[in-house]
Amino acid sequence: MSKSRLPELPTAALVTAEGEQVLVAARSEQGHALINLTGSGWAPFHDSDGRPVKQGASMLAAATGNAVDQKAHGYFRYRWQLSEEERENVKFRAALCHAMSEIEGRDGRLTEGRLNTPQVRREIEETAGTIFGQKIGRAEMRGGRAKLAWPLPKGRTLLKYLRIFKDEGAHSVSLQDRHRLKGNRSGRVTHDVRLLMTEASKVWLTERKPSMAVAHAELRDLIESKNRLRRSRGLKDLQVPSLATLRAHIMKNVPSIARHIARNGEKDAHNKRGPGSTDVRAQMLGELVEIDECKLSIIVGIKEAGQWEELDEVQRARLVELEDGIRKQRIYLVLMLDVATRMPLAWVLTDQPRADATMAAFGMATRSKEREQQKYGCLREAAPAVGLAMVRNDNGPGLRNSVTKTAMAGIGTTSVDMRTHRSADKPFVERMFGTLETELIARLTGYTGNAPGALPAYDAVANGKLPVGVLYEIITRYLTDIYPHEPHFGFGMFGRTPYEVMQQTLREQGMIPPPSPHDRRVHLGKMARATPNDEGIRAFGLPYQSTEFQKLRDLYRGKWAVYLDPDDLRAATVLIEGYKEPIEAQLTATFFADLDFYEAKAIIEECRRQNPRNANPSEHHLMEAWRAIKATNRAFEGQFGSWEDIARKFERMTQGIHLPQSTGPLAVAMPGSLADADPVGAFSIGEGAPEPLEVAPAASPNETSPTTPTARRLGRPETKGKMT
C-alpha cells in the first residue's frame, strides 16, 4: 500500500490511478471524494497523507505524471470554444507574442525593463499592429472624442504572455484569460448533504408535479434524521441548504429532458422534446399525406343575418338554448397536408369530427379547388386534384371508422394508423396546426388563447361574433394565398415555398393520378335509393335521366342505388341489383349544375320552408277565396235537400227485386253444339225472335191475388263454395 501524499486535485479532475480512471467529485479538509469510472462507483475519502477515512477501505495510489486533463483546470483547447470577445483578445496577444519573438530573435533575450523602453514598445506596436490588422497603442483624442485602440500592456504582462506562448508551443489559445478560475472554486456543500439532496429530489421528480418547496421540506427531514445520528456520535450538525441550492443541484445533475420525462411522462416528452426525424419520406405529390383534426382556439357566432327573423318562437327558444352550448365549444378543423411539398390539400370545418367531415376532406383533396378560388376571391392557385397513395391518420373519431376505411380502400389508398399521443408520427400536420394558430387564429376576434387562462383580460365568448362561413373564407384565403407562398425551413425545403416545391415536383417527379369521377361518386359520394319512372330517377330531390333507364326499368323493378358527387352534381352513377354495368345519368335540372350538394340541398329546403310569420294570413286568404267560389257556384245550382229528403230517396232506391239463388242447371247451350241446326238450349236471334218474357207485377202487400204463373228467368250458376 502506497503512503505517498496525494496532490491537491481540483474538483472535476480526471485522474488515472492503479490502471483505473477516477473523477474528483468533491474536496474537503479531510481529503478527496473520487468516482471510479471503470469500477464500482464511489471511492472513499482520503486524507492529505493518503490514509482512508473509513476503516477497511481500499486506498488508491497517488496520481502519476501528467494525469490531470487540461479541461480540469478550465482550459479550452480550441479557438471556437471561446467567446467572441475572448477570441479577439487571444488574437491580439498572439500578435504581441509574434512581434516580441521577432525582436528577441534579432536583438537577444527580452527583459521586463527592456520591454518598457519607448523604442521597443514602438516597434512592438508597429509589428503587432500589422499582424493583428488594427491599431495598437494609446487612445488619441480627436474632435472631442477618443479613437478606440488596443492598449499595449506593460513589460511585466508582455513577458508573461511571451513565457506562456513559448511553454505551450506557440499555441495562441493558451493566451486565454483565466479569471474564471480565481477564488475558491470548491463546493460549499458537503458530500453527505449532496447525497441527501439527491434523495430529496426524487420527491420533486414525480408525475404529481409537486413544487420545489415539497422537496425542500423532504430535505429538511432527511438532514434532521442524519443530524440525530451524528449527534449520537459526537459529530457536527449538517446545515440545511436553501431552496435555491436544491433547485440548482437538480438542474445541474438532472438533464432537462429527464426532468420532463419524470414530471410529464414519456409520451409528452416524446411529443415536445423528441428528436424527430430528418428523412425524406415522399417525393411525389400525393404519395404520402397526413390528416388530422384539431380543435381551433376560437369561438364563432351561430346567428346569421336574415335567418333569425324567419324563425318562430319555438325555434328561437331552441336557438337561444343552443347558443349557450355552442359558444362554450370550439370548432374543429380537419386538415390534410402533402408531405413531399407541404401543400395543404383539404380543409373542412365541423362542430363534431365525424366521418362525414373526413369524407368531405377526401373529396376536396381529390378534386380541383377552383370553386373555392372563385367563390372567395383567391389570388393564387391551390393544390390540384390529386390521388392519395398513403394516408397517415391518428385515433380521432372521424378518422378511424369503417366508413372512412372503406372509402380509402375503394379509391386505392393505403391507410396507416399512427399511435395515439405521438405527434412525432405525424410531425408535418401537427406543426402546421401550430403555425396556423400563431399566424392566423390569434389575430381573429373570439380567440381563446393557447392555454387555459392565457387571456385573462379578454372575453372570448363575448367577442365570438365571427360566423362559421366567414371563418372558412379566412382560412381558405390563408391556405391558398399566404401559407403556400411563404419560405419554409422544414427539413428538405431549405427556404423554398411549398408552391415552388410543388411546381418542381410536378415537373420532375409527377403526381398520383386522382380517382375517376365514377370512383369518386361511388366511394366518396352520397347514396340514395329511388324508384325510376318515365321522367328518370330522383335522388335527394334532384332529377336524373339516362337513355338506358327506359330499357332497364321494366326488366329490373324496385329501387335502384343512386350515387352523387357532392362537389359535382352534373352526373350520377346508378347501380342496379342484378345488372353488371354501372349507368351514368345526367342532371336534367340545369339550374343545379353549378351548385354543390349542400348548396342545392339548402335551396330545396329553403323553397320547401314556409315563413311562419306569413303562414296564418296565407291560410286565411285561401279560405276566403274558396268560400267566395262556393257562394258563386251555389247561386246557379239547385238547393240541397234536407236530411229527411235524402233518407226517403235512399229507401226508394234500395227497395228493389231480390231474387232467390238458382239451384237448377243453367239453360244454356252445351259446349260444341252452338253451331248445330237445332241447338239445345240456344235462343234465336234476329227476326222471329220470341217475345220478351213478361214478368207479373208485384202484388200489393195489402191485397191477395190468385196463383201467379211462374215467370221464366235465367238463374245464377251454383258456384258457392266452389273454386272457379
Image: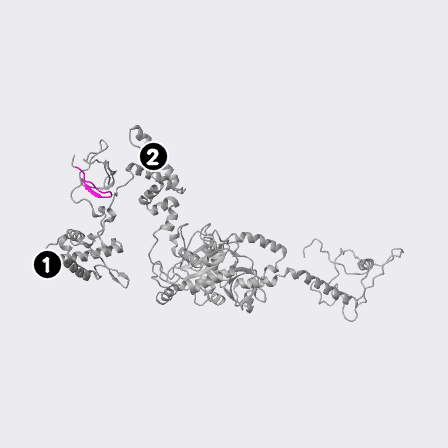
Quadrant position of the N terminus in the picture: top left
Amino acid type at circle 2 is Ile
Q: Which residues are magenta?
A: 5-17
What's the residue at 60%, 55% (across, down)?
A: 316
Graded by Cα atoms within 10 Å as few (under 14), some (14 to 19) or many (20 or more), the crowding at tag 2 reads many
Which residue is at the far top? 232
Compare residues 686 and 116 and report the one nearer the observer.
Answer: 116
Compare residues 710 and 426 and report the one nearer the observer.
Answer: 426
- Whether the magenta-drawn stretch holds residue 16 is answered as yes
Q: Quadrant of residue 506?
A: bottom left
Tell me, yes or no, if residue 409 can be seen here.
Answer: no
Which residue is at the far bottom? 687
Is residue 137 shown left or right of residue 403?
A: left
Select label 1 or label 2 by which is in front: 1
What's the residue at 33%, 57% (across, down)?
A: 279
Amino acid type at circle 1 is Arg
What's the residue at 16%, 36% (across, down)?
A: 4
What's the residue at 31%, 29% (across, down)?
A: 231
- Whether the magenta-drawn stretch holds residue 305 is answered as no
